[in-house]
Structures are given as C-alpha cells and as structure tokens.
Image (cartoon, grey):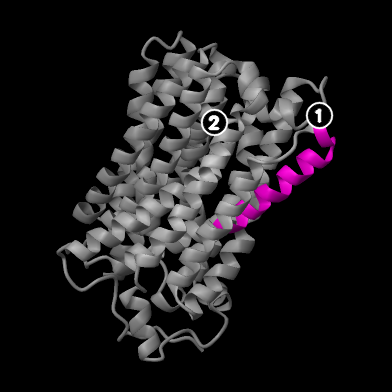
Amino acid sequence: MMQAAPSVPSLGTSAVLTRNDFRTLFLAALGGALEFYDFVVFVFFALPLSELFFPKGTAPWLAQLQVYGIFAAGYLARPLGGIVMAHFGDRLGRKRMFTLSVFLMALPTLAIGLLPVHAQVGLLAPVLLLLLRVVQGIAIGGEVPGAWVFVAEHAPKGRVGFACASLTSGLTVGILIGSLTAAWINHHLSHEQVLAWGWRMPFLLGGVFGFIAVWLRRWLSETPVFAAMRERKELSRELPLRAVLRSHRGAVVTSMLVTWMLTAAILVLILMLPNLVQKQFGLSPDVAFLGNSLAAFFLCLGCISYGWLVDRIGDRQALLAGSIALLAGTYVLFGDLANGGQHFLLLYSLVGFLVGAVGVVPTVMVMAFPAPIRYSGLSFAYNVAYAVFGASTATLIEVLAERVGHMAPAHYVAITAVVSAVVAIYLLRQRRAAL
C-alpha cells in the first residue's frame, strides 16, 4: 500500500530562486513552448486543411467540421499517453518521460508537413492526418502534466505558483509562435500559395522545433523530490493510478473541473477565435491574426502575473479572482464584436491577459496530490478532462455559433468560469474546515 511518506520533501526547501532554478524553468518552458507549438499550429490552419484533405465539392462548413474532428482526436488520445507516461514517471523518474514526450511530438509534426493531400491519394490523406494527430495527442498527454510536476518539484518553497505559471507561460509562447507564423503566412502568401505549399511550412518548422526541444532537455536534471523518494525507497508500491482512484477521487474531480475552464479559455478565446471572428463577425484575416498574436503575447504575461499572485495570496484565492475576471472580460469582448469590433485589438489583448488565469490551474492540481502519485493523479485528471471537454469543444462551438448565435462561445466560456469559481470557493471552505 502506498504511504504518504512524510519524510519526502515537499515542493522545495527555500523561498529563494537560485540561478539553477531559473535555468531549469527556462529550459523546461522553452522546450514546452516548442512542443506546444507543434500541437496547436494545426488549428490555425484548419481552413486550408479543410480544403486540401477532403473531396472538392464538400460543403465548407462540413469540411471544417471534419478537420475540427481530426483536431479533437488529438485530445481523445491524450489520456492514453498521459496514463502510460505518468505511470513510468512515478516509477522511473520525471525526466525520462519529459524527454520522451517531446520526441514523440516532433516526428508526427514533421510527417504532417510531408503528407500528400486528397487530390493526390484520396481518402488516405485524411486517414493519415488523423493517425498522426493521434500520435501528437499521445505525446502531449504526457508532456504537459509531466512538465508541471517537473518544475513544481524543482521549485523552492513559496515559489511553486510562479514555477508552474512560468511553465504555462512557456506553453503559451508556443501558441504565440503558432499565431505569428499563421499571421505571417496569411499576410505574405496568397490563398492559392497557402494551398499549394504554404500550409506545409509551419509543420516542417515544428518538426525542427521538436528536435531542438529534445536536445534542450538533455541539460535538465531529475527533480529533488523524486530523487529523494527513490533514495529512501518511498515510491508507490502499488499501481499509482489505482492509488489515485482509490484514495484521491475528490482531488480528481476538482482538478477535472478547473481543467474544463482551462480548456474553454485556451480553445475558444485563443485557438478558435481567429477563425470565429472571420466567419461570425466579418473581420479580415490580417486583423484576426494580429489580434490573436497580441492576445497570445498578453496571455504569456498574464500567466506569470497570476503565478506571482498565487505565491502572494494562495492558489484558491487567485483561482476565484481569475475566474470572475475572465467571465467579465469575455462578455466585454464579444459585446464589442457584436457591435462592429471597434475595440477588438485592445479588448482581445485584455482578454488574453485575463486568460492567464489558467496559470493558476496547475498549482491547484499539483498541490492536490501527494508526491508518490502526483504525476499519475494530475495526468489522469487533466487528460481525461481534456479528452471529454477539449475533444468536444471545437465542434460544439462551431455548431453553436452557427445555430444559436454569435454570443454562444462567450456563454460557454462563462459557464466554465462560474464552475471554476465554485470550485475555488469549495476548496477555500475545505481548507478553513481543516484548520
């Protein structure tokens, strides 16, 4: 049976970030940025992919829906990668899985850039695209939870919020790189050039990024927390996931609910909004992707700011404040869009910063599970939630926006923000009851 092992170090022993801590955070965040770029760049090119990988004559809305379905397949595959890598991460070490995940991402990303299209090989084209997207999902399923655990267990005491948020900010830099790449391609290439060869550029570039990330992670060391557990033989003696599901179901549920807010904020407000504002509100591609680049930039700053806030006032208080601010900002942005989008760039930048509230989520989850099963617990909750909510969100938002109205995406994000706020209040009351 697994024991709590009180002798295992908590998350850090000092409140001061050393030069080595900053080096670890920088390398982990940079590697995560390059890998996350590989995973999200797909959605920025959903429109050209929908034209290239399905038969000519397919209704545009149906082709795009099918591409979003392939995009969602990556989310459905995440639990598989997450559960397997987390199991070995809790048994063999965080660093090994941390390096393997980025390698598994680089290969399919490069391969997508080399794929034949429907006009060349027929139905085999979308099938191959689907298979490669599944491999990407397996890789990212191990990457993101492993990265959060890795930096949290390297962080000094009192700096876990900043460490997790810095890593999250690094992941969002991947979104920014993808957005800037899409903006550059859409600005400098004609639609015909994008369809002919331009769409391949971001995936080929992503493959190169991935192999750079593999090389960067050679310089990282195992976490002190895991090293101490291994030396003292305090690793979980049973299947880590079994221990999670037997003794930590409450932590799993709360982690899944706050992950729902994270998926909605990132998917709807950052990844999908450039396409939504073009289709639903008539903005030009240049304006849409410029706004998205600004939002992604301020998202990076927002994550770090919320991480700083976590270390000052606590993760639960920061989660509550961030959820309420996100709800308000989302409605302000969509209200402006419904009235012509006169302040789109300014408000989208603000909302990007407010989406930085997602930087609080990893700290909430890291603190919810004890060290011997931390990777498995966080990975299971996060990836299952992403599979359930992330896989359905893109298609659901596309349908709701078409059939319910322009404000449907805002309502969806608002619902998840309310749920997140309720979770924060519940956790605050739980902590007070324990005192």
Q: Is residue 331 above or below residue 413?
A: above
Disc nearest the viewer among 1 and 2: 1
- The residue at 62%/20% (across/down) is 193
Q: Is residue 38 magenta?
A: no
Residue 352 rendering spot, x and y as whole percentages: 37, 32
Residue drawn at x 34%, y 34% is 297
Q: Is residue 257 left or right of residue 78?
A: left
Q: How many discs appear?
A: 2
Asked if residue 168 is positioned above or below residue 327 in the image, the reply reads below
Hey, what amino acid is under mark 2? Met
| Residue 381 appearing in the image | no
In the depicted structure, whether residue 321 falls above or below residue 156? above
Q: Read off the residue under disc 2.
A: 272
- The foreground one among 261 and 216 is 216
Locate residue 103 relative to residue 134 in the image: left or right.
left
Residue tagged 1: 119
Magenta stretch bounds: 120-139
Nearer-the-camera pick, 254 or 370 = 370
Looking at the picture, how far across and down is residue 203, in whole percent? Answer: 57, 40
Q: Is residue 422 above or below residue 81?
A: above
Residue located at (57% from left, 72% from top):
245
Q: Amino acid at mark 1?
A: Ala
* Secondary element at tag 2: helix
Quadrant of the rendered structure where residue 221 is? bottom left
Q: Dot 2, how many residues are within 10 Å of its Cα: few (below 14), some (14-19), or many (20+)?
A: many
Q: Earlier in the sequence, mark 1 or mark 2?
A: 1
